[in-house]
Image (tube, rainbow, N blue to C red):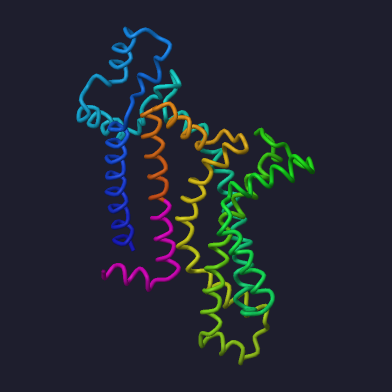
Amino acid sequence: MLRFIGRRVVIGIVTLLIIVTLTFLLVNMAPGDPVSAKIRQLPDSARETIEKKYGLDKSMFERYIIYMKNLVQGDLGDSYIYVGRSVNEVIAKNAPVSGRVVGLAIVFQLIIGLFLGTMAGLFREKIADQVIRIMVVISICIPSFVFAALLQYFVAFKWKLTPIFGWGDPIHYVMPVIAMTIGGLAGYTKYMRNSTIGVINEDYIVTAKAKGVSKGRLIRKHVLRNASIPIITMLGSSLAGLFGGSFILESFFGIPGLGSYYVKAVQDSDYSMIIGMTVFFAAFYIFILIVVDIMYGVADPRIRIAKGKN
């Protein structure tokens, strides 16, 4: 097990190093520069001072070496646009906001998705299955920001049940969490349906029925437990997808999360903020994938053994 975990950690570190390097090169090779964006209203004499302050007067290779040294120490750099604020401070302050919204959405996706998927699998080709499959198609075809716009119009504007914008109170979580939940619900439902259909045809299910196990106990103890194991593999990609989708939804609902800062950083050519947040998201995603891989290995030892042999 330790060898299994160690291999995943090494692969994750190498992947993160590649992502950091590529992001640094792409951002620094992009047209424009942060100094021009910063000193639009200042004389040209200010350029040299600002470039020296942020190390932009050095070559790209020198800046890369300096950045990597700072990164190893946990320093993601200072913002070019938000004077006196470091990328670490922005992430520490705003990541919990995005995390709470995404976390709630994941919980609701799991609960609702597992329930709908199980029902669709148990009532295959019946009316319940047909209705759930139509809902899945709608969820796949319509982007989450469309659901967000509809929620704003009906729930906030027409019915006046929640504020359209704002943040700070529990009521402000309602619309963004619902929009995120609907947008990512299809994957869990579809995956759980297929997994349930596969499980109910297994020999141990037939044996349990023959022994007189009640339908409720059969679903809870056998079908749901075994069909849910493959869902673990979806958690990593779901988290990444929700964080990516939160960029748009945070702008829709005025949420002061990382998404709004990331979009603003791109607009203002805030290189350190772009690179720092990309590194943070990549590190978080890789960490989640490692945890999910370990959980899957613990839940199903056959996966751990097979991967170890490979």
Q: Which of 8 and 30 is in front in this view?
A: 30
188 versus 274 height, above or below: below
Question: For residue 60, which quarter of the picture?
Answer: top left
Q: Horizontally, is 127 left or right of 67 in the view?
A: right
Residue 131 part of the magenta segment: no
Residue 69 in the figure: left or right of residue 100: left
Out of 116 and 305, give the one closest to the viewer: 116
Position of the N terminus, as image quadrant, is: bottom left
Residue lying at 37% horizontally and 73% vertically, measured from the top left:
302
Residue drawn at (47%, 68%) of the image: 230
- Does 181 appear above or below 196? above
Name which quarter of the figure residue 185 lies in.
bottom right
Please state the extent of the stretch shown in magenta in the rendering: 288-310
- Main SS, magenta residues: helix
Q: Residue 260 or 234: which is nearer the viewer?
A: 260
Q: In the depicted view, which residue is nearer to us: 308 or 128?
A: 128
Quarter of the image where the C terminus is located: bottom left
Q: Is residue 266 above or below residue 51?
A: below
Q: Where is residue 27 in the image (x, y as percent from the top left)?
A: 32, 34
Q: Position of residue 262 (x, y in %)?
A: 46, 34
Residue drawn at the location 69% of the way across and 76% of the way down: 127
Name of the residue lying farthest toward the right: 159
**Number of marks:** 0
Residue 215 x, y percent position in the rendering: 67, 82
As drawn, which residue projects farthest toward the bottom?
210
Q: Quadrant of residue 290?
A: bottom left
Q: Position of residue 228 (x, y in %)?
A: 53, 69
**Magenta stretch: residue 304 in it?**
yes
